[in-house]
Amino acid sequence: MPKLIKPLLITLFFALLLTAPLTASSQGNDGYKRLSKPQPTSTAEDKVEVVEIFWYGCPHCYDFEPHLEEWLENKPDNVEFVRMPAVFRQDWLPHAKAYYTAKELDAIDPIHGAMFAAIHEQGKRLASEAELKEFFVAQGIDADAFTKAYNSQSVESQLQRSLAMLRRYEVTGVPAVIVNGKYQTSGPMAGTYEGMIRVMNDLIERESQ
């Protein structure tokens, strides 16, 4: 069974992430900032990638979710939407692994919203593999399939990519949204969740031209 990430590397990553200055990036008064260096996207050239960075335990992410879901119902056809779980502390790792486990099992639809509800409405922590396994089984996922996926190399690889991209995206809080690897918006930048959606749409339109 592969180890997730060496503890020392995790500690160093968190230390660098939380102390990294953002002086190289520009932020105006338009509700977003331009990243200091454009990042590669995982979409076709004619698509605009929108990446939501979140944590299941974050109340702001929970509050933003209905706005995002409404936006997803009417998002532009040329937008490719990607979710990316954030890890700012080591105790966030199980939630990030839970997301990628659900993705690996093709079970995002039953798991994603239920995770938010379980934590913020039912007061569950879901902070360990055992707790997550019980939760996934309650959502209809086979217990052995969960264990295999949760500890798989694929989930580990996706998690390590998230750790790397989190720093490259210059994200210091959640929820945050990255548009086409060039721009970041968030609640503090845009002022409100509705403002975040407005900024997202403006940037998508800009990148679509």
Image (cartoon, rainbow, N blue to C red):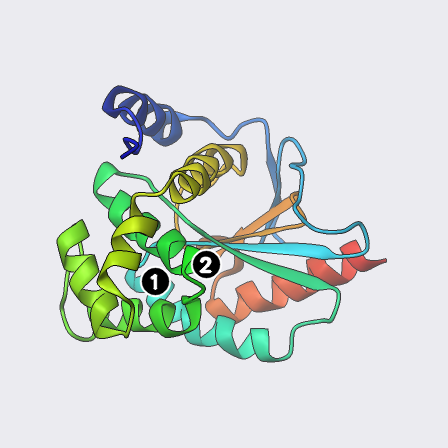
Q: Which mark is residue 169?
A: none
How far from the left and from the top, in percent, is residue 199? 62, 62
Along the polypeptide, which appears first: circle 1 or circle 2?
A: 1
Q: Nearer the viewer, residue 91 or 19?
A: 91
Query: What crowding class fits label 2: few (fewer than 14 Cα within 10 Å), some (14-19), or many (20 or more)?
Result: many
Three-letter code for the amino acid on which mark 2 is drawn:
Gly
| Residue placed furthest toward the right | 209
The residue located at (28%, 24%) in the rendering is: 6
Q: Nearer the viewer, residue 105 or 58?
A: 105
Q: Which residue is mark 1?
A: 60
Residue 57 visible to the viewer: no
Kind of element beneath mark 2 = helix
Q: Which residue is mark 2?
A: 187
Kind of element beneath mark 1 = helix
Query: What crowding class fits label 1: few (fewer than 14 Cα within 10 Å), some (14-19), or many (20 or more)?
Result: some
In the rendered image of this protein, does residue 51 appear above or below residue 5?
below
Q: Are marks 1 and 2 in contact (CB under 8 Å)?
A: yes
Quarter that holds the C terminus = bottom right
- How much space separates mark 1 and mark 2, taking CA atoms? 9 Å
The residue located at (20%, 66%) in the rendering is: 135
